[in-house]
């Protein structure tokens, strides 16, 4: 089908939930994509930080196809080799004790929030169930994770929301005012992606960790977007030198297939028992085989290369006329410009560059394997658009 046919079908039959750019992507290689009309684009979005190795990566495809040749789905009534291998890899790389697999970041966060309440209930009984999230956060679109999202724009239409959730500013004075004897967990993102790619202050995060440990409040770190090499570490919390109790991740973990994970550390290891949570598709063998390939390839050497690319990209962005401020961490960057973020994204698309927006800022999260040539080509387009 050509673009017009695809767009027409979508407008007739698709739920009216997405504002799409006028492009239908059809293929490509690495960080260079091609649409149905044959036009090429440099990809600075990676499917919203998902395609960590870009598209058409040969090693990744081999792992996926190899598993498809065996069994595509088994359910969690049975053991599954790719799932077991991924559990082992994640625990060995992070120090986590156990892993629960879901289908998305929202589901991984849902698991962590439930686990925190279960941990507290089993240890302290009723009444200690409050979740404290940060203002300007984003944790997903299920009712619980949407409630934990600290942005008023998301808190319409769907009342009543889940009770027992409150929001604090990203400082300890506010945390102490909001948290109390009824608090079981605090959930944070080390870099608040959907509110403009804003990193949290490292001193605040470390003090928050000490506060939570002293109160036996579980610290949940949402690594849905920041995880799996995106910031130049396997997970962003490593930059902050903290030890969370629960870590959630998704997006890039399976390199383009739907998979989420909730990692249980230390005292949270036994927060959930048999029958207290579950998923039909979570830990699907094909998705787990893809994720084993991703995590295995995110070596220290590879992550150092990501850090080098990130420094190059940040420096080049700061040097562009019209760029006012660059924020973020690793290959997860945001900036304000003289022009609106929406206008920049539209003009970039016209000239062959895909960028994202977040809270009035331009967001850049390219494949981690993007080449210098592709970065330079994308930056050249961005420079032209910002003139």
Image (cartoon, grey):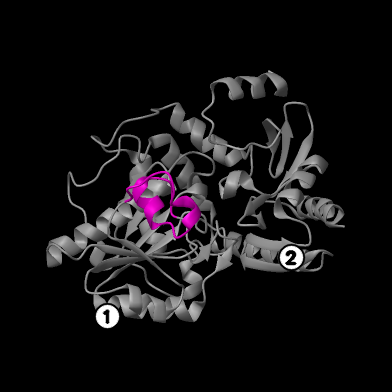
Q: Is residue 95 visible?
A: no
Query: 10 Å neighbourhood of mark 2: few (<14), some, or many (≥20)?
Result: some
Question: Which image quarter holds the C terminus?
Answer: bottom right
Who is closer to the viewer here, 253 or 6? 6
Is 37 left or right of 217, judged from the image as shown? right
Please tell me which residue is depicted at 65% across the width and 56% down the height of the picture: 363
Who is closer to the viewer here, 194 or 155? 155
Pick out the residue farthest to the left: 125
Q: Is residue 111 visible?
A: yes
Label 2 and label 1: CA atoms lie apart by 40 Å
Q: Which stretch appears magenta? A: 139-161
Mark nearer the viewer, 2 or 1: 1
Query: 10 Å neighbourhood of mark 1: few (<14), some, or many (≥20)?
Result: few
Helix, strand or loop: magenta stretch: loop
Please tell me which residue is depicted at 80% across the width and 54% down the height of the picture: 382
Who is closer to the viewer here, 320 or 310? 320
Sequence-first disc among 2 and 1: 1
Please tell me which residue is depicted at 27% across the width and 38% down the height of the picture: 79
Q: Considering the numbered disc 1 on the image, is that residue within a helix, a strand or a loop?
A: helix
Residue 251 lies, in percent from the top left, at 50, 48
Q: Number of callouts in the render?
A: 2
Please tell me which residue is depicted at 46% across the width and 68% down the height of the picture: 237
The label shown at residue 214 is 1
Residue where numbered disc 2 is placed = 312
Residue 333 lies, in percent from the top left, at 64, 61
Q: Is residue 2 above or below residue 217?
A: above
Is 332 left or right of 210, judged from the image as shown? right
Question: Which image quarter holds the N terminus?
Answer: top right
Check if residue 49 falls in the magenta segment.
no
Is 186 left or right of 384, judged from the image as shown? left
């Amino acid at each position: 089908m050509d673009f017009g046919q695809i767009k027409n079908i979508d407008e007739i039959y698709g739920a009216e939930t997405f504002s799409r750019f006028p492009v239908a992507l059809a293929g490509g290689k690495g960080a260079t994509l091609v649409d149905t009309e044959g036009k090429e684009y440099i990809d600075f979005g990676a499917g919203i930080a998902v395609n960590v190795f870009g598209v058409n990566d040969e090693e990744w495809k081999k792992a996926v196809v190899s598993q498809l040749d065996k069994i595509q789905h088994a359910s969690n009534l049975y053991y599954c080799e790719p799932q077991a291998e991924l559990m082992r890899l994640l625990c060995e790389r992070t120090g986590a004790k156990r892993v629960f697999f879901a289908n998305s970041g929202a589901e991984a966060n849902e698991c962590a929030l439930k686990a925190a309440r279960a941990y507290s209930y089993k240890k302290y009984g009723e009444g200690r169930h409050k979740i404290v999230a940060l203002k300007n956060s984003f944790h997903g679109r299920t009712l619980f994770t949407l409630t934990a999202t600290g942005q008023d724009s998301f808190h319409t239409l769907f009342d009543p929301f889940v009770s027992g959730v409150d929001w604090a500013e990203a400082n300890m004075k506010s945390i102490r005012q909001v948290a109390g004897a009824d608090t079981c967990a605090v959930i944070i993102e080390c870099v608040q992606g959907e509110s403009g790619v804003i990193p949290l202050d490292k001193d605040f995060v470390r003090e928050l960790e000490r506060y939570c440990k002293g109160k036996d409040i579980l610290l949940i770190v949402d690594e849905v977007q920041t995880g799996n090499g995106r910031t130049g570490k396997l997970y962003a919390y490593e930059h902050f030198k903290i030890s969370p109790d629960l870590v959630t991740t998704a997006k890039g973990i399976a390199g383009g297939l739907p998979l989420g994970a909730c990692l249980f550390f230390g005292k949270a290891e036994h927060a959930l028992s048999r029958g207290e949570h579950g998923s039909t598709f979570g830990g699907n063998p094909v998705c787990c085989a893809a994720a084993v390939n991703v995590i295995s390839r995110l070596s220290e050497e590879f992550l150092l290369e990501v850090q080098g690319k990130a420094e190059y990209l940040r420096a080049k962005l700061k040097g562009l006329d019209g760029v006012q401020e660059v924020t973020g961490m690793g290959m997860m960057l945001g900036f304000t410009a003289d022009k609106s973020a929406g206008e920049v994204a539209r003009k970039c698309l016209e000239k062959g560059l895909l960028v994202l927006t977040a809270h009035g800022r331009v967001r850049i999260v390219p494949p981690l394997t993007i080449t210098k040539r592709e970065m330079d080509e994308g930056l050249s387009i961005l420079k032209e658009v910002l003139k």
